Amino acid sequence: MLYPGATSDVQAYLYKCIYQPTLTYGLKCMSSNAIQIRRLESVQGRLIKQTLGLNKLSHNTALFKALTIEKIEAIVNRNVLSLYNRIFKVESPARRLTAVLIVSFYV
């Protein structure tokens, strides 16, 4: 996972294109709690540090900001909203089921 000679921008790009989609695949269809999200964010931090060859004691928040990498929670929220947007654009059984589930949740 360490790419010697590659700049941090290139390594961040590789992370965003390869590791992040793999790490978040299928999360929009699953129910996840705060503990699971924290674990995924911890894995994300370790992957970034390994990719860049950094010490595991480096802080994730500063690293995410410097490399403009989104947290897992933000990615999951964006993907879920995108999924709902696509579901409600087309008349289908999935749309009707989702509408019933949302109404029953609010009632």
Image: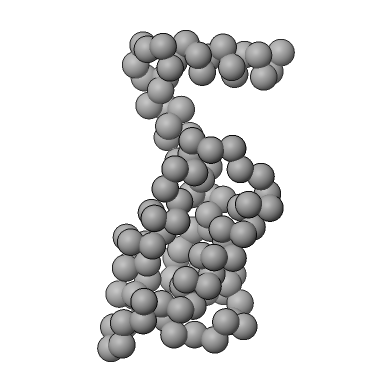
Residue placed at 39% from the left, 55% from the top? 22
Between 101 and 89, the one lying in front of the other is 101
- Horizontal side of residue 4 vs 43, given as left or right: left
The x, y position of residue 19, in whole percent, is 38, 62
**Vertical arrangement, residue 79 with respect to residue 10, above or below:** above
The x, y position of residue 34, in whole percent, is 68, 49
Q: Tell me if residue 78 can be seen.
A: no
The x, y position of residue 103, in whole percent, is 62, 13
- Horizontal side of residue 86 vs 75, given as left or right: left
**Vertical arrangement, residue 17 with respect to residue 102, above or below:** below
Residue placed at 71% from the left, 13% from the top? 107
Q: Tell me if residue 91 can be seen.
A: yes
- Horizontal side of residue 96 vs 14, given as left or right: right
Residue placed at 41% from the left, 59% from the top? 20
Q: Quadrant of residue 12?
A: bottom left
Between 103 and 56, the one lying in front of the other is 56
Which image quarter is the N terminus in?
A: bottom left
- Horizontal side of residue 27 vs 6, given as left or right: right
Residue placed at 36% from the left, 19% from the top? 89
Q: Quadrant of residue 100?
A: top right
How many discs mark residues in the rendered view? 0
**Vertical arrangement, residue 107 with respect to residue 73, above or below:** above
The x, y position of residue 41, in whole percent, is 57, 61
Residue placed furthest toward the right: 107
